[in-house]
Image (cartoon, rainbow, N blue to C red):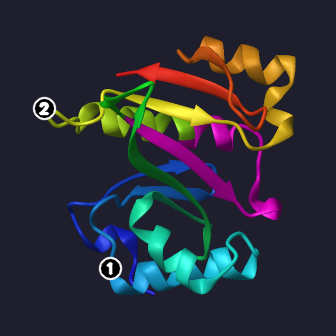
């Protein structure tokens, strides 16, 4: 598999024995195939077609020390509250055996910083995070979101917490 560091345009940071690379808008076919394969082996999406449709949303690729893809952070642009107000909607998946303490926070904050630093005029103005994992609704996790600049906006129609972070 092509290493992420081969392209000087790819920004990458380290977290313990993992690398997190900003690949939004620069996905190669090989990286797309790796993401779809990871989603499929973890049964995250109902069909391969759904996985291929979502692969262009990948913003960050998380790789283990041996180069294996173990997680991704994705964003998609959509309106919120008012259709003309554009936001990045953020999601993340890390394979269970690679969920090390602090990684979720690190990847989430780095993704937000990356999009803040690469903000285009007229582009999405903030990041919306909708919690799907019930563990993220615990009081300690809510305090962590607040400490890291996220504003609690309430619950969505499925009972998920909705958080917003401004650039």
The image shows residue 111, relative to residue 83, as above or below, that is below
| Residue 106, image quadrant | top right
Q: Quick one: SS at disc 2? A: loop
Q: Which residue occupies the foreground of this view, 122 or 112?
A: 122
* 95 horizontally vs 84: left or right: right
Where does the image place residue 99, in percent across and percent down from the top left? 76, 53
Q: Which mark is residue 12?
A: none
Mark 1 vs mark 2, foreground winner is 2
Q: Quadrant of residue 130?
A: top right
Tell me where the magenta segment starts and ends, as one range: 87-107
Q: Position of residue 113 (x, y in %)?
A: 38, 32
Residue 67 visible to an observer of this rendering? no
Mark 2 or mark 1, which is nearer the start of the sequence?
Answer: 1
Look at the image and tell me whether residue 157 can be seen. yes
- Quarter of the picture containing the C terminus is top left
Residue 29 percent across, percent down from the top left: 36, 85
Q: Crowdedness of circle 2 by 10 Å Cα count: few (<14), some, many (20+)?
A: few
Q: Residue 143 at x, y = what percent?
A: 74, 14
- The number of callouts visible is 2
Task: Report helix, strand or loop for mark 1.
Answer: loop
Q: Is residue 127 above or below residue 95?
A: above
Q: Are marks 1 and 2 in contact (CB under 8 Å)?
A: no
Q: Residue at x 55, y 43 (%)?
A: 107
Residue 21 against residue 52 in the figure, above or below: above
- The structure residue drawn at horizontal position 67% and vertical position 72%, both measured from the top left corner, is 45
Q: Which residue is mark 2?
A: 121
Find the residue positioned furthest to the left.
121
Q: Residues within 10 Å of mark 1 (few under 14, many from 20)?
A: few
Q: Give the residue number, with chain letter if any, for mark 1.
A: 28
| 124 or 2: nearer the viewer | 124
Q: Is residue 126 left or right of residue 101?
A: left
């Amino acid at each position: 598999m092509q290493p992420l560091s081969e392209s000087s345009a790819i920004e990458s940071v380290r977290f313990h024995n993992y690398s997190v690379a900003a690949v939004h808008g620069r996905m190669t076919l090989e990286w797309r195939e790796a993401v779809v394969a990871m989603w499929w082996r973890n049964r995250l999406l109902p069909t391969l077609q759904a996985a291929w449709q979502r692969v262009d949303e990948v913003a960050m690729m998380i790789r283990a020390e041996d180069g294996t893809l173990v997680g991704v952070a994705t964003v998609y642009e959509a309106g919120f509250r008012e259709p003309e107000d554009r936001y990045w909607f953020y999601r993340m998946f890390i394979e269970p055996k690679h969920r090390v303490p602090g990684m979720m926070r690190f990847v989430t904050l780095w993704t937000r910083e990356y999009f803040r630093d690469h903000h285009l005029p007229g582009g999405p103005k903030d990041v919306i995070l909708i919690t799907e994992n019930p563990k993220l609704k615990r009081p300690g996790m809510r305090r962590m979101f607040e400490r890291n600049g996220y504003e609690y906006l309430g619950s969505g129609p499925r009972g998920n917490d909705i958080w917003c972070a401004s650039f």
